Amino acid sequence: MATAVTLKQWLHDGGEIALLDVREEGEFGEGHLFYGVPLPFSRLESGLERLVPRSSCRIVMYDDGASFVAAKAQALARRYGYSDVHVLEGGTRAWEEAGFSLFAGVNVPSKTFGELVEHTEAVPLITAGELHDRLAAKEDVVVIDGRPIDEYRKMNIPGSLCCPNGELVYRIGEIIRSPETTVVINCAGRTRSIMGAATLRRFGCANRVVALENGTMGWRLAGFELEHGSDRLYPLPPHGVRLEEIRREAADLAGSFGVSKADAETVVRWLGENNRTTYLLDIRTPEEFGQGSAPGAVSAPGGQLLQATDQWLGVRNARVVLLDDEEVRAPVIASWLSQLGWETHVLEGGLAAAASLPADPGLNSIATMLAEQPPVGPQDLVAPGSDVVLVDVRHSSEYRRCHLQGAVWATRARLDNVLGRIGSCPALVIADNETLGRAFAAEIAGAGCKVVGLHVGNPDLWRRFGLALASTPDIPSDADCIDYLFFVHDRHAGNLDAARQYLAWEKGLVAKLDKQELAGYRLRFPRA
């Protein structure tokens, strides 16, 4: 056990530490520690090795102090080979009682950084009303949506172009042909709008660059309609002389913030250290990553990495190495990541140098420790047996949207809720991920119930086989959906009150920081 006071000291002693919140996503979002990294107990096996790749790293897990989930997660982590695992005594309750703050929402360190950047760099904003009028007047304005393509396609400012923030510097010259064009960067809310605009301004973009105040939420709150299903995507990147120019500019920008290059030999040595954690992140687009990357590298598209560092970096004070293939995007993202408080390096030579890196060690050792379950195909679900209980362990929102008729929803964090339904009947686990399905099956079997198989599937597969499906928008109840944070997600579903609540939360983050948390950032201007 670690007390709240001890944990506070550990978080600021300069050593590596992974602070893992093992409650479900909805519980995490209602109030967590500032440096808490979400790793829900129900998804422990799929995220632990990725977030904490070094098994000897100091780890502290926590819950609300009453659910005992942290103790269960600690026992599992030790079983999986992690040797220095602690539990926060009293959980979030004890943390508050010690006088420390809890933070609502998700991706708090990154969101807070965006707010700091806006004020420190005086990023200019444009209101939805002003942008609407300028677009209606057909002024020379280009709206660039800095979110990933899947988010853009769900909803976007009419007429906007999708170019994720990590691609902006790389591709802006192919998008904007006149220095007179006003460039507006937007996202769903605030952070990526601010960061995208600040990135272009720092890179010396000759155009007037502004951020759309409050993004698509601000647009809807102003009474304007959004587009859906748009497909206006970023152009091909530059080549030749222009590529060489921006490569030099990117290197100068990174160097001005003290970001260093690391050759392949050095990175090999770092990855082999057993007393220090090194992350190797490929910040190119997912499509590029899918065509091949460095051995052991993890896909972390640059704009999203800055938006949500806690989705990739679980160990505070770890070392981070970024790579791309043209040495433009990685240096730019590294310049920001270093200001977020991370020791950040760029792989010299990019992807071409990656051939000398060690073979991918594979982060699937936990999966090999889980007992296999008989695979059950969709054809076997036509008549699974009258006494078989179908236990759906997917996300509650997915279950609500569509599930196999007769299946019951369960979360591993509240296993007792489903054990009574199973009783002496055989259980068949339904999951969207084999590792998680096997982990849940092991929990059920460990409680004394019989598991007869595991089906990994989704509604599209089930429809193809003509299986009976059901939709239950109110089951599980809101109270039981502990893996869903309503005010974060509902803002995208037309809930304007949720949008207002979200924006107020985002703007209030900086005021909640204590001196040590604020000092963890290293926001500064480029060196002269």
Image (cartoon, grey):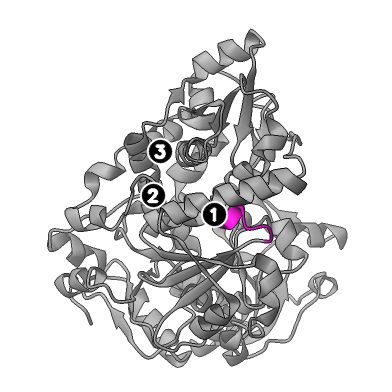
Query: Residue at left 24%, top 55%?
Result: 519
Q: Amino acid at mark 3?
A: Tyr
- Secondary structure category for the residue under label 2: loop
Dot 1 or dot 3: first in sequence order is 1
Residue denoted by label 1: 251
Q: Magenta segment: does it hold 367?
A: no
Dot 2 or dot 1: first in sequence order is 2
Please name whichever residue, 66 or 503, is drawn nearer the observer in this view of the structure: 503
Q: Position of residue 372 (x, y in %)?
A: 67, 89
- The total number of labels drawn is 3
Cα separation between marks 2 and 1:
35 Å
Q: Nearer the viewer, mark 1 or mark 3?
A: 1
Q: Amino acid at mark 1?
A: Ala
Other-residue count near label 2 (Cα within 10 Å), few / some / many at <14 / 14–19 / ≥20: many
Q: Position of residue 525 (x, y in %)?
A: 36, 44
> In the picture shown, does residue 138 fall above or below 219?
above
Cα separation between marks 2 and 3:
8 Å
- The answer, for residue 148, to whether it is visible in the render is no
Q: In the rendered view of the protein, which quadrant contains the N terminus?
A: bottom left
Residue denoted by label 3: 502
Q: Position of residue 411 (x, y in %)?
A: 51, 68
Q: Position of residue 377 (x, y in %)?
A: 81, 75
Query: Residue at left 61%, top 35%?
Result: 145
Q: Which mark is residue 105?
A: 2
Query: Residue at left 23%, top 50%?
Result: 513
Q: Which residues are magenta?
A: 325-330
Other-residue count near label 3 (Cα within 10 Å), few / some / many at <14 / 14–19 / ≥20: many
CB-based contact (under 8 Å), mark 2 and mark 3: yes
Image side of residue 83 versus residue 362, left or right = left
